[in-house]
Each structure stands twice: as structure tokens, then as C-alpha cells.
Amino acid sequence: MTTPRLYAGSSARRTRQVAGDVLVLVWVALWVRLGDVVHDVTLALAASGRGIERSAGDLSARLRDVGGALGGLPLVGAGVRAPLDDAGRAAQRISDAAAAQVAAVQHLALWLGVVVAVVPAVLALAAYLPMRWRFVREATAGQRFVDGAADLDLFALRAMAHQPMHRLARVSPDPVAAWRSGDQQVIRAIALLELRDAGLTPPADPDTVP
């Protein structure tokens, strides 16, 4: 099984790829952190609502307790208990409204944090990852053919189909004729154009190997 080739063979392009990967990771981490900050800041708005919920709930419970205690008094018990029960119910409604406000703020904080964190991160990854995946796929597949000088014929053919004319002309005035005649120097020079664009390391030149 071929090992995936994550980075280009040339140091300059490999450096750019590593820098790009790091920048994308930093970008994603930054927006995740900002999303967390937005969540916490928004959630802080619910603090007053929680205080009202607790206070009103405690007041409601106490009013009901007092009303229950006074309700047992002879003659005046029922009359005293009724307004206390009404006040307790009113306090409970205030507590319930405050609880609903807290829940709404919590829901808002969650979604604001998610949107702030996820949207920029997803946009960056959607733009960057397909480009990186194409490179890894093409470089991994191409590396299987870079085993020796004989394999350069394939990349020379690809170069003549893909490379701009002015780049081919700098190598040879007639690269097709040179390829057909088996001119290994021209074939290697043309193949190197394609190999560099694919991020692959060419095989050693047999003429330079002792």
C-alpha cells in the first residue's frame, strides 16, 4: 500500500504547504475561541434573570408557607390566607417568566457561539481542504510511477499535454521530436516540469550517480 504523500518534495513548496496547514488550524482555533467568548458573554445576560427567578421563587414559597400557617387561625384564617396565596401565585408567575427568559438567553448564547465558531471555520476548511486533498491524491498516485528514469517518459508525456508552450520551449525547440527520438536529457528536463508541479521528487539522474 502506497504511503500518502502529504507534502511536496521541493522544500519551498513544502514550506508553503506546512504554513498553509498551520494557518488554517490557527484560523479554526481562533474562531472556536471567539465562539466560546461570544457564548459566555451572551450567557452572562441571563444572570439577572436567574436572580429574579430565585428571588421570586423563594418569595412565592414563603408566602404560601405563611398563608398556610395563618390559614389555620380561627375566624380570620381564611380571609388572611387568600391574599397571601394570591401574592404567592403572582410571585411564582414572575419566577416562571424569569426562568423562560433565562432559557431563551441560554438558547441564544448557544446558537450565537455555534454560528461564530462554525461558519468561518467551515468556510476556510471548505476552501482549503479540497485543494490539499487533490494534491495528496495526485502526489500519492504519481509517486508510484517515480521509480526510475524509465518512468520519466510518462511525466514527459503529461508535461507536453499540460505545460504551457513557453515552458516547453525553454527546454527544447521541438520537445515532441526529442521525446520520439529518446533524447533522455530533454525527456528528463520536460518531465521535471510536471514532477515539480505535482510536488514529486524526481528519481536520481543516472548520469550524475557515481
Image (cartoon, helix red, strand yellow):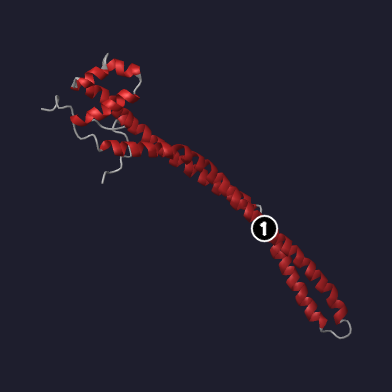
**Residue at 85% across, 81% down:** 77
Return the x and y of residue 53 as percentages of the image width and height: 70, 63
Return the x and y of residue 98 as percentages of the image width and height: 71, 60
| SS type, badge 1 | helix
- Between residue 164 and residue 54, name the one nearer to us: 164
**Residue at 24% across, 17% down:** 177
**Residue at 15% across, 27% down:** 206
- Between residue 121 and residue 132, name the one nearer to us: 132
Question: Which of the 4 image quadrants contains residue 81?
Answer: bottom right
**Residue positioned most to the left:** 210
The number of numbered badges drawn on the structure is 1
Evaluate whether residue 83 shows in this view. Answer: yes
Quadrant position of the C terminus in the picture: top left
Residue that label 1 marks: 102
**Residue positioned most to the top:** 173
- Between residue 204 and residue 188, name the one nearer to us: 188
Left-right relation of 89 to 189: right
Question: Which of the 4 image quadrants contains residue 91?
Answer: bottom right
Q: Is residue 164 above or below residue 204?
A: above
- Given the image, on which type of amino acid does mark 1 rest? Val
Left-right relation of 135 to 40: left
Q: Is residue 154 above or below residue 36?
A: above
For label 1, the crowd category at 10 Å Cα-Cα, with few meaning under 14, some 14 to 19 and many 20 or more, is: many
**Residue at 22% across, 18% down:** 178
**Residue positioned most to the bottom:** 74
Evaluate whether residue 203 shows in this view. Answer: no
Left-right relation of 151 to 158: left
Return the x and y of residue 125 as percentages of the image width and height: 46, 41
Return the x and y of residue 132 as percentages of the image width and height: 39, 38
Question: Which of the 4 image quadrants contains residue 207?
Answer: top left
